[in-house]
Amino acid sequence: MADAPQGPYGLPPTGQPTPLADGEFVPAIKNRDVNFATCEIDPPSAEYLDVDDVLVLEVIQNGSFNTVNANLRILRPHGRIETVQLSVVGTVGNTLQSVTRNEREGYILSAMVVSAATVNAGNPIFARLGIRRGATGPANEFRVLCAGYLTTSQGMSWPDRQPMQSAEGPGWPLSISVGNPAAGADWTYTLPTTQRLDVYGVHALLTTSATAGTRTVTLKVTDGANTLFLIDATNTQAISLAYDYTMYPSSFAGGSAGTHQYIPLPEPLVLMQGWTIGTTTANISATDQWSAIRITALSWFDIL
């Protein structure tokens, strides 16, 4: 240790402490060493991509087609982070559409799936992002990263969100307009091959002509081949009248004010893809007309 500077008469300079002798100072807390691994480091995620893997983005919508984007961050060799995007532009309603990307070695760090435009109330969007191991055939492993319904304000992400099936969740409220049948015919709504409904309301207007005969309306539900429910209206309908038929769970059976008829529905009334709901009308004439037909229900995509 160098000699301490000397003041007058060999004293230390004013304001300077006397130098401590070796070993005289001991810190109260000893600093701990901080170490970082520089080799054999654990992978940043469990989702490793190999050269034979394929990224798959699947999307299904009712209509008003939105572009759906999947954005991924992938760690490539030598520490390079790459941003990858897959996009599906909807063109066909109630049909599962997909896009694929052949991959190379890397680790997925994060993934986010969002709708590029506002999601309308009557246009649910279900998306699923995953990895097809080895090839694109259905026999190969499909590792789902994230799956669920998209909204305007919320997409879905990996690894933060638990994947869900298309028929899970609270459902999407829908008001379905059924086209008028030809005069003298009953109406029927057949669920598309990707739809599931929990029906909680049906309305239809029957206008009878002057042709003689008393009409009796029956609600009919089938699984596409077999009759499941036949529910008759309590009151009949005479000629030259227009009756509103309203059907919902817990409704009483009967009429009100003469032109309103009520038919109770089973609760729940869950219809699967390919099932039908409609009417059969006893003594319907060639000039009777069903119109203003609408079904209200909770809807899910039913992807098998």
Image: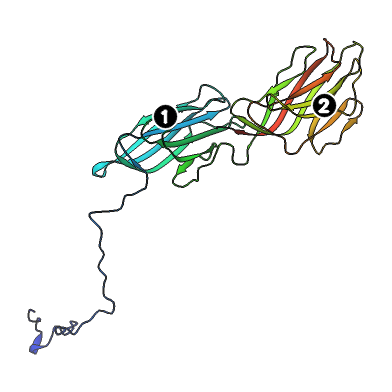
- 28 sits left or right of 59 in the view: left
Q: Which residue is mark 1?
A: 137
Residue 174 position by quadrant: top right
Residue 254 is situated, as x and y percent measured from the top left of the image, at 89, 31
Which mark is first along the chain, 1 or 2?
A: 1
Residue beneath the point at 36% across and 34% down: 134
Please tell me whether mark 2 or mark 1 is closer to you in this view: 1
In this picture, is 196 found above or below 216?
Answer: below
Residue 235 is situated, as x and y percent measured from the top left of the image, at 90, 27
- 60 sits left or right of 255 in the view: left
Q: Which residue is mark 2?
A: 245
In this picture, is 67 found above or below 186?
Answer: below
Q: Secondary structure at mark 1?
A: loop
Q: Amino acid under label 1? A: Gly
Q: Give the alpha-carbon distance from disc 2 to disc 1, as whole Å.
A: 49 Å
Residue 99 position by quadrant: top left
Residue 103 is situated, as x and y percent measured from the top left of the image, at 33, 34
Residue beneath the point at 32% across and 34% down: 52
* Camera-side residue of 30 and 79: 79
- 39 sits left or right of 183 in the view: left
In this picture, is 130 found above or below 277?
Answer: below
Q: Amino acid under label 2? A: Tyr
